[in-house]
Amino acid sequence: MKSLRIFFLITDIGFILYWVITLIGVIPASYLFKDYHNPILSAWNWSFLPLDLMISFSGLWSLRLMSKADARWKNVALISLVLTFASGLMALSFWTIRHDFDISWWLPNLYLMLYPVYYIVILSKQKI
């Protein structure tokens, strides 16, 4: 599960960094999604904050439990993986409905949707 640890660190720290830089407004304008300053789209983006923070919290908590050889880490990891999948799926569904196929927003969300599937299958097959 060393590779899962790497994915969790990248994803969980990445989410925290994304929200910090979003909060302080340092994302270059060329990287903002279409209609970024539209109040409805801004609200849509910020609606992901609780979900993304739950992903980070559960992923980092899972790593902590794993480091202590606490068997609960698998259940917490599954929660984090399912939430991560849902976050990517929700974003891609939104972009699809809008017919907005900007690769710079699709790739990170495809990552969020696809990598968890592998680990969900692996962890689901293991006895917990």
Image (tube, helix red, strand yellow):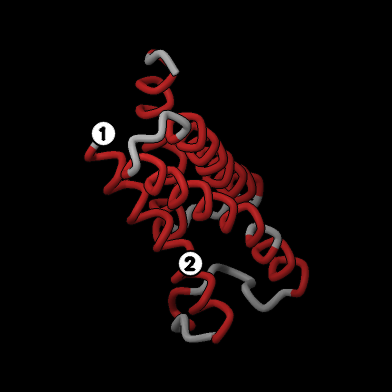
Quadrant location, the C terminus: top left
Q: Is residue 19 above or below residue 114?
A: below
Foreground tag (2 vs 1): 1
> Residue at image x 47%, y 49%?
61
Q: Secondary structure at mark 2?
A: helix
- From the viewer's perspective, tell me whether residue 114 is left or right of residue 89: left
Write down the residue under mark 2. Answer: 16
| Residue 1: mark in rendering | 1
Amino acid at circle 1: Met
Task: Give how far across and how far down residue 45 sits, in percent.
Answer: 65, 64
Near-viewer residue (71 or 112): 71
- From the viewer's perspective, tell me whether residue 16 is left or right of residue 7: right
| Residue 73: mark in rendering | none
Task: Give how far across and how far down residue 118 sits, in percent.
Answer: 35, 27
> Residue at image x 58%, y 49%?
91
Q: Secondary structure at mark 1?
A: loop
